[in-house]
Image: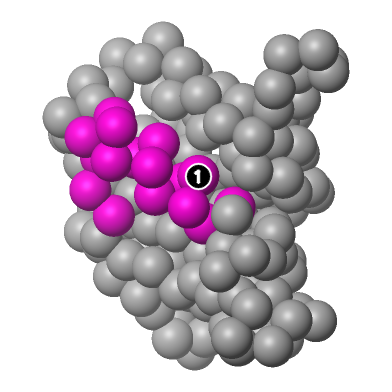
């Protein structure tokens, strides 16, 4: 698990050509998330990951300019097993709790949602796929928390590379 900082801006999806390094070259905050990782940041950061059926939720506090991203593999942890951020319900609560500790108000949060592909499933069976279940957990938890989803690139049959820039809440998704 990782915890860091986040910052600026207005939400948008940005083209690859706009992915210039953040100012402050050597002190730049970049983070790559593996499955089960998350990152919360009050400083400008570029957070990246690669998703298949996994899902990433990017949260941004527009008032305090704090951001977070997770990367989870499975929809829900159930008591009896060890709690892990590899599960959507645990990973989402982890970033929400970190944001609240840093002073975020849930009313100021907005979300971007990515992943949930069904790499080896036909279109007519998507609803029962692991990817679909991962997306459903994210949507349900965000709705329950009153956090609007302002951008979403989910489903389909291809993986995605994601970049979330916490300096302005911009996100980039490319199918891989």
In the image, residue 83 sits, relative to residue 160, either above or below, namely above
Pick whichever, 176 or 27, lies toward us.
176
Magenta-drawn stretch contains 39:
no
- Residue 26 seen by the camera: no
| Residue drawn at point x = 28 percent, y = 22 percent | 104
Residue 101, x across and y down, in percent: 41, 10
In the image, residue 134 sits, relative to residue 64, either above or below, namely below
Which image quarter is the N terminus in? top right
Residue 106, x across and y down, in percent: 24, 26
Residue 142 vs residue 137: left or right?
Answer: left
Quadrant hosting residue 62: top left
Residue 141 vs residue 162: left or right?
Answer: left
Residue 126, x across and y down, in percent: 60, 75
Label tally = 1
Magenta region: which residues? 134-149
| Residue drawn at point x = 72 percent, y = 14 percent | 79
Magenta-drawn stretch contains 137:
yes
| Predominant secondary structure, magenta span | helix
């Amino acid at each position: 698990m990782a915890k860091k900082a986040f910052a600026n801006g207005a939400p948008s999806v940005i083209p690859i050509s706009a992915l210039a390094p953040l100012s402050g070259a050597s002190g730049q905050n970049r983070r790559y998330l593996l499955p089960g990782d998350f990152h919360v940041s009050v400083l400008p950061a570029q957070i990246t990951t690669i998703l298949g059926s996994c899902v990433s939720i990017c949260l941004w506090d527009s008032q305090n300019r704090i951001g977070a991203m997770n990367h989870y593999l499975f929809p829900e942890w159930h008591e009896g097993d060890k709690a892990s951020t590899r599960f959507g319900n645990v990973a989402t609560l982890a970033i929400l709790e970190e944001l609240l500790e840093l002073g975020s108000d849930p009313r100021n949060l907005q979300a971007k949602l990515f992943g949930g592909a069904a790499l080896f499933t036909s279109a007519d069976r998507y609803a029962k796929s692991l990817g679909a279940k991962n997306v459903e957990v994210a949507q349900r938890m965000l709705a329950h928390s009153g956090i609007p989803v302002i951008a979403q690139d989910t489903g389909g049959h291809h993986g995605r590379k994601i970049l979330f820039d916490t300096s302005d809440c911009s996100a980039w998704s490319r199918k891989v």
